[in-house]
Image (cartoon, rainbow, N blue to C red):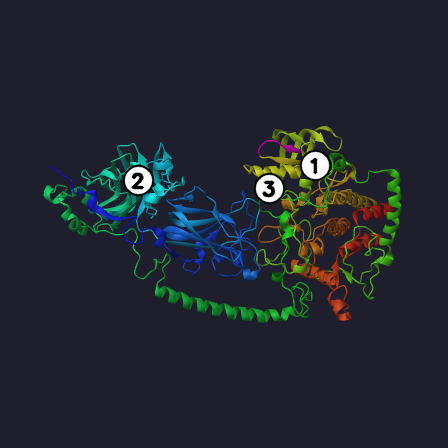
């Protein structure tokens, strides 16, 4: 007869209790050591991220807590919100038990302003990612409240993982940066997963006693393939059950069952020495330990040994305790362990099950399990309790161990151990490599020194944070384009911030649809009479003479009309403006493809702008259009529902060509069937349109923001503005825009030249194009909407050579070479923008005036050449630096040599461009914004030129 291997009274195996010895009982006192983010034990290549704003300065390798490396933290490319997901990932290479986290913002030596107010934790185990939640069920964890204080957080439900992700979170769009640390210890239990019947949600006293941290799957109340509270290293206490709180506990419990079965799966074949089970006994709540426990072993999870280890418990109803029971397992070998508990009362509560194992047998022969004899003498295999005097001797016979032993050296094994010899070889190799690079760089710099003596442009100090030290040259690395310039042009997918403007009153539907030229005839004539006189004086040659006379005092007050002190009639400029000349024979034409010659500019993310006194921020950007319509959104919300926007089905659209991509989705050229033509205000059988479609499956908030912005664009009603015609109802959701029958202006001019009987476009036609562009921009100016991407490519040509201003070119692959595209795929129309828009981020209608003059230059060049084709990006930025220096030093006098070094470059006058028109262009390129004419003045003067 085969018999039971071990039968021991429960009372005999009492090891510790909640009120027992003062020993470390759980993981929070054991796994308290950092895993190496701060100290560098975790190497850089083990730290990755979903994206980085700038890899070198704020890449994931800089996310080390209490370290000020490079930019000072990891900063994701996109602003964080509920709809944007970015993460920082740390690879620990092997399983660890994670118990604490630390987070910190970007201090950046006092310049940083970014931190994460909240974050998620995700961890990798068993080939999949899991999201962490605490005892309360919260997944969003507390972050930081400033950039410098460290926030250390205890994870009340520790988890086992080989990789950890920090996912910053914010309900509203927010720029975040993070530095982190992880605390824990190497996972030495070798438990891969356990499966069991789901615990009770409502336990004694209404407590939640289900396995709150179980990360496997649930199939018909059966939990499989996961780990949870039974292996997290936390020992539950009786007080958790006796308190009145209804929060989760560190206990897992079952009720009204005969037996509870738990199956443990291990990573490999193990030799089991003993097992510890932490149980609760509270007689007044009908909570008792098990009456009988069986343990079976298996190598494959299907065939278990015929005989089990047994443990018989003696019920002691005199006390309420939480105790750990140790069961010797006689060096049994297996990979799967099945434990079965027989309930002794209504409730069974378990908190922790720990196995103490050794490496598998030297032979690794599975036949050991089959050949092992289970027949033993009953007198040797069965231990009975004869008297209380034998209690102490039996306890001493067991190999009792604590949950996690603290090593005497008070340290945790290194997750990334490095041998001494390996370190020495790496150090020597590194030094030799550095020395070789030093020699190479020295030779290169000596060679370059001669070339620098004949540099094309003198380097200046205007961009060096108001430095007045002469002779210092600027570098592209010193130039950081203002964040507010590129927000609306970025290719990052991000939700929209809708901000109300204090100085823009809401308009009614009638006001929005009314052309800015419609008003009472008498008052209009009177106003035009006065405006005509001012415009005449504005563009007179007297106001355009370039002299070296003393400069008038700088006027700081803003100018809203001609009555201010900085009127165009009284303010004189001392600008030394030189038309752009050719420094090289190489030109950049419209027909060439690819990107311009560009350099990547380094700079710390979100750091203080190099021109701090002039820095401006803007919340008016939209990811769906370069037009600055965002502050209109809230002002016009009350008119949106009443404004009738046509909605059509996608089956009415036939795709002709893919133009490109935006930050929101795809842009196509389509043929629309049976939709209203905005020109004739009637349904047209077929017409060519541009369709902007959102990506499939976008979040509702992004779709709502897209709809709001498209409603605002639909309200722009002017004969020289391309209209938003309709919205597409089905997925992918989108908007339909008007497109010209002859395409955009560069395409129209190119096609004209390709005709066999081509005729050069007359001056009158070119002037007509310019007047129509000015008319459309005058309308946008009256609505206080800056275009921010005015160029010939954004002018479409309709029937009767009617020009309409669009905004589609930034999304067209065809015109990628017109934009400065940095390493973050941000598109910037650098060669068309005003100097203050580039360096100070000031986007306004007066900045569009600058771009308008560049557009005039394009038209007279037949759109064959881009502005400043002979200048590199670096030289363009240096030129803008001279404009900035001229504007900020307007009260200073310069000597002749200094004036020569600070000559301002502008596009040269074309052969077909008359002098009176070029005078307008130079006035549009005035250094001071208030000295530039408005579009209303420009339009009036151009009409006068056409009449003459």
Residue 288 position, x and y percent, is 27, 38
Precedes in sequence: disc 2 or disc 3? 2
Where does the magenta region start and end? 722-731
Judging from the image, what secondary structure is the residue with disc 1 in?
helix
Q: Which residue is mark 2?
A: 349
Residue 244 at x, y percent in the picture: 39, 40
Query: Residue 613, located in which quarter of the rendered image?
Result: bottom right
Q: CA distance from mark 1 to mark 3?
A: 18 Å
For label 1, the crowd category at 10 Å Cα-Cα, with few meaning under 14, some 14 to 19 and many 20 or more, is many
Can residue 87 be seen?
yes
- 341 to the left or right of 851: left
**Which numbered tag is attached to residue 714?**
1
Question: Does the residue at mark 1 contact the one at mark 3 (Cβ under 8 Å)?
Answer: no
Mark 2 in CB contact with mark 1 (< 8 angstroms): no
Q: Nearer the viewer, residue 413 or 548?
A: 413
Image spot of residue 351 (x, y percent): 32, 43
């Amino acid at each position: 007869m085969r018999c039971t291997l071990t039968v021991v009274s429960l009372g005999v195996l009492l090891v510790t209790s909640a009120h027992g010895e003062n020993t470390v009982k759980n993981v929070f006192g054991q796994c308290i050591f950092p895993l190496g983010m701060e100290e560098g034990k975790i190497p850089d290549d083990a730290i990755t991220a979903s994206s980085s704003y700038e890899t070198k300065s704020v890449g994931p390798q800089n996310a080390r807590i209490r370290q000020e490396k490079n930019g000072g933290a990891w900063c994701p490319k996109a602003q964080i919100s509920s709809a944007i997901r970015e993460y920082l990932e740390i690879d620990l290479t092997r399983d660890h038990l994670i118990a604490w986290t630390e987070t910190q913002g970007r201090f950046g030596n006092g310049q940083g302003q970014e931190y994460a107010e909240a974050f998620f934790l995700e961890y990798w185990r068993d080939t999949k990612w899991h999201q962490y939640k605490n005892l309360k069920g919260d997944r969003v964890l507390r972050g930081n409240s400033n950039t410098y204080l460290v926030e250390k957080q205890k994870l009340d439900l520790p988890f086992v993982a080989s990789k950890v992700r920090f996912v910053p979170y914010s309900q509203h769009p927010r720029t975040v940066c993070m530095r982190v640390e992880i605390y824990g210890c190497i996972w030495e239990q070798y438990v891969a997963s356990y499966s069991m019947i789901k615990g009770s949600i409502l336990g004694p006293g209404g407590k939640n006693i289900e396995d709150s941290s179980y990360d496997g799957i649930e199939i018909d109340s059966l939990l499989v393939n996961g780990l949870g509270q039974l292996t997290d290293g936390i020992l539950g206490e009786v007080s958790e059950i006796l308190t009145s709180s209804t929060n989760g506990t560190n206990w897992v419990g079952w009720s009204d069952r005969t037996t509870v079965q738990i199956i443990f799966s291990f990573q490999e074949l193990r030799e089991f020495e003993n097992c510890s089970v932490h149980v609760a006994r509270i007689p007044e709540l009908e909570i008792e330990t098990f009456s009988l426990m069986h343990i079976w072993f298996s190598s494959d999870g299907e065939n278990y040994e015929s005989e089990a280890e047994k443990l018989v418990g003696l019920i002691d109803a005199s006390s309420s305790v939480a105790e750990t029971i140790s069961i010797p397992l006689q060096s049994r070998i297996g990979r799967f362990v099945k434990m079965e508990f027989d309930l002794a009362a209504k409730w069974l509560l378990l908190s922790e099950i720990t196995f103490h194992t050794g490496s598998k047998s030297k032979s690794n022969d599975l036949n050991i399990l089959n050949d092992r004899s289970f027949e033993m003498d009953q007198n040797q295999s069965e231990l009975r309790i004869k008297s209380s005097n034998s209690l102490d001797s039996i306890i001493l016979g067991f190999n009792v161990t604590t949950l996690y032993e603290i090593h005497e050296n008070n340290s945790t094994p290194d997750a990334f151990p490095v041998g001494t010899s390996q370190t020495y070889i790496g150090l020597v190799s590194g030094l030799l490599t550095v020395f070789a690079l030093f020699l190479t760089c020295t030779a290169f710099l000596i060679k370059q020194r001669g070339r620098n003596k004949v540099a094309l442009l003198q380097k200046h100090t205007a961009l060096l944070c108001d430095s007045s030290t002469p002779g210092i040259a600027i570098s592209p690395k010193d130039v950081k384009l203002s964040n507010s310039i590129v927000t609306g042009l970025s290719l990052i997918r991000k939700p929209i911030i809708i901000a109300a403007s204090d100085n823009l009153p809401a308009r009614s539907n009638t006001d929005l649809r009314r052309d800015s030229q419609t008003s009472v005839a008498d008052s209009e004539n009177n106003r035009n009479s006065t405006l005509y006189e001012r415009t005449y004086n504005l563009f007179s040659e007297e106001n355009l003479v370039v002299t070296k006379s003393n400069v008038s005092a700088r006027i700081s007050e803003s100018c809203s009309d001609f009555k201010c002190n900085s009127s165009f009639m009284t303010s004189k400029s001392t600008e030394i403006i030189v038309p752009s000349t050719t420094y090289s024979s190489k030109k950049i034409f419209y027909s060439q493809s690819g990107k311009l010659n560009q350099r990547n500019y380094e700079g710390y993310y979100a750091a203080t702008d190099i021109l701090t006194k002039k820095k401006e921020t803007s919340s008016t950007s939209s990811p769906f259009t370069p037009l600055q319509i965002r502050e209109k959104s809230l002002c016009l919300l009350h008119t949106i529902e009443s404004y009738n926007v046509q909605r059509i089905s996608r089956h009415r659209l036939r795709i002709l060509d893919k133009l490109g991509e935006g930050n929101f989705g795809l842009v196509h050229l389509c043929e629309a069937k049976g939709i209203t033509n905005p020109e004739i205000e009637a349904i047209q059988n077929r017409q060519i349109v541009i369709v902007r479609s959102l990506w499939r499956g976008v979040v509702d908030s992004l779709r709502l923001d897209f709809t709001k912005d498209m409603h605002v664009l639909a309200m722009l009603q002017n004969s020289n503005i391309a209209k938003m015609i309709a919205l597409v109802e089905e997925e992918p959701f989108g908007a339909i825009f008007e497109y010209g029958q002859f395409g955009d202006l560069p395409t129209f001019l190119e096609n004209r030249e390709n005709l066999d009987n081509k005729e050069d476009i007359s001056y009158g036609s070119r002037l007509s194009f310019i007047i129509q562009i000015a008319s459309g921009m005058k309308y946008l100016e009256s609505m206080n909407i800056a275009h921010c991407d005015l160029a010939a490519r954004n002018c479409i040509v309709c029937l009767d050579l009617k020009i309409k201003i669009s905004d589609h070119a930034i999304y067209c692959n065809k015109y990628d070479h017109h934009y400065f595209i940095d390493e973050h795929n941000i598109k910037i129309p650098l060669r068309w923008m005003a100097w203050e828009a580039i360096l100070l981020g000031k986007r306004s209608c007066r900045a569009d005036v600058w771009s308008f003059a560049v557009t005039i230059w394009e038209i007279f060049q037949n759109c064959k050449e881009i502005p400043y084709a002979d200048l590199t990006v670096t030289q363009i930025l240096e030129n803008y630096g001279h404009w900035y220096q001229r504007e900020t030093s307007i009260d200073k006098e310069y000597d002749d040599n200094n004036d020569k070094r600070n000559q301002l470059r502008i596009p040269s006058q074309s052969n077909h461009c008359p002098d009176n028109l070029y005078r307008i262009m130079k006035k549009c390129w005035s250094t001071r914004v208030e000295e530039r004419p408005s579009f209303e003045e420009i339009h009036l003067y151009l009409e006068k030129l056409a009449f003459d």
